[in-house]
Image (spheres, rainbow, N blue to C red):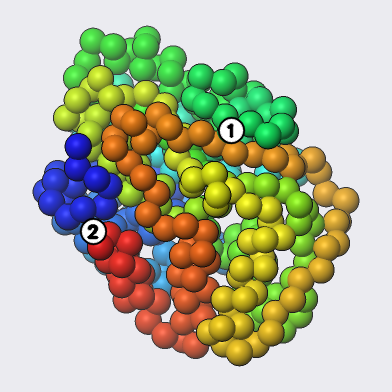
């Protein structure tokens, strides 16, 4: 099988394809649209308008090279219109309420977006025979987490603890149900991808560790870390995005490959939040000479898992896939982006450069 990231088959597959990306105005969505446009895909996006924390969509300069439709995934009629316009062959579902803390503040909204949004998506797919390959992107938090030194595999029970994680577990189950109930006799491949924590340039969301680091360093204040000893599978955003595209391509060519896949880093790159911030501070100092520091200060917030790892053996053996960038690379390219942004450089061009660097 062709290794992930090589030019050739993947580019030729996506060139000219009609691709619908839900959640395209977000952090992952903006990077994904950049990649797809670079491959020559005909990209349509459906998402809420970018808010003050979703600056990357504008900074990436992708809007003029795609069809951007502003709408709410909870609005079935609006989503159907997006399918009418795009006539998609490939659907990548990223639209979500993706913050744990916000899910505690508004659980109803979280379930409406993450569960009924998924239902609406598959109701549309039922109506459009043009769709041939679908990927629903969920999270590593879908598993029943016993917080032990154990890397979860795809057959482990689903039962996320908080409303965000649980709603994503439900989204997985919705996907599996629709696939079995409505698409088993149709020429369409459907998978889910359970991705680890992603970092990278252009994430400005609240209550995320790298954006929090950037905001603190920009203000030249100490970084506040709530849970420095929690372990997470951190990876650069390009890592899962190319894995998503690989799954979409390969399952379209061979429907036996569809299923559900963990997408995360190697075990050595599952690190504590404190270690991640240490690496960020060192890299920032190397590139800017400003000496950064952090302090441990728990703010009494809601429950968050202290230990979480993924076993990605299935993805590796099925697709001959391996992670390309380790945690040091992920930090280096993230810091490079934020410093370029701070210096008012062309971060859209830098995104293209980093994508090419990843693919080499």
Specify which label sits upstream in the sequence, 1 or 2.
2
User: In x, y percent, where is residue 51?
Assistant: 54, 62
In the picture, measured across the screen, residue 300 lies left or right of residue 176, that is right
User: In x, y percent, where is residue 342?
Assistant: 53, 83
Position of the C terminus by quadrant = bottom left
| Observer-nearest of 35 and 177 | 35
Residue 37 bears which disc, if any? 2
Whether label 1 touches label 2, CB < 8 Å: no
Residue 151 bears which disc, if any? 1
Tell me the quarter of the picture where residue 103 sits: top right
Note whether 187 is above or below 131 in the view shown. Answer: above
User: In x, y percent, where is residue 74?
Assistant: 50, 36
Count residues near mark 1 (Cα–Cα under 10 Å), then give few for <14, some for 14-19, many for 20+.
some
Note whether 87 is above or below 206 in the view shown. Answer: above
| Observer-nearest of 230 and 186 | 230
| Observer-nearest of 258 and 49 | 258
Residue 52 visible in the current orientation: yes
């Amino acid at each position: 099988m062709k290794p992930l990231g090589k030019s050739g088959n993947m580019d030729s597959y996506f060139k000219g394809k009609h691709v619908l990306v839900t959640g395209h105005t977000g952090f992952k969505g903006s990077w994904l649209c950049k990649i797809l446009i670079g491959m020559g895909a005909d990209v349509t996006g459906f998402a809420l308008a970018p808010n003050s924390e979703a600056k990357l969509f504008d900074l990436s300069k992708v809007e003029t090279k795609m069809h951007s439709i502003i709408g709410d995934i909870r609005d079935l009629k609006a989503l159907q219109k997006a399918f009418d316009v795009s006539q998609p062959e490939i659907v990548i579902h990223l639209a979500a309420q993706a913050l744990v803390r916000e899910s505690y503040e508004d659980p109803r909204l979280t379930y409406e977006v993450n569960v009924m949004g998924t239902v609406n998506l598959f109701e549309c797919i039922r109506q459009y025979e043009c769709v041939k390959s679908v990927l629903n992107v969920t999270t590593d938090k879908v598993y029943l987490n016993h917080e032990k030194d154990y890397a979860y595999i795809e057959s482990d029970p689903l039962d996320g603890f908080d409303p965000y994680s649980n709603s994503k577990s439900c989204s997985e189950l919705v996907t599996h149900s629709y696939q079995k109930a409505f698409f088993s006799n149709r020429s369409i491949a459907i998978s889910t991808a359970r991705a680890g924590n992603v970092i990278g340039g252009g994430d400005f969301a609240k209550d995320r560790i790298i954006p929090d680091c950037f905001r603190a360093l920009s203000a030249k204040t100490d970084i506040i870390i709530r849970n420095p000893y929690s372990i997470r599978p951190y990876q650069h955003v390009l890592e899962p995005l190319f894995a998503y595209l690989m799954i979409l391509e390969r399952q379209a060519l061979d429907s036996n490959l569809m299923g559900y896949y963990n997408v995360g880093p190697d075990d050595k790159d599952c690190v504590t939040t404190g270690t991640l911030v240490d690496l960020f501070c060192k890299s920032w100092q190397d590139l800017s000479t400003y000496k950064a520091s952090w302090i441990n200060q728990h703010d009494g917030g809601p429950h968050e898992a202290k230990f979480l790892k993924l076993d990605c053996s299935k993805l590796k053996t099925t697709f001959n896939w391996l992670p390309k960038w380790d945690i040091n690379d992920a930090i280096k390219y993230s810091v490079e982006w934020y410093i370029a942004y701070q210096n008012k450089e062309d971060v859209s061009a830098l995104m293209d450069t980093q994508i090419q660097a990843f693919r080499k």
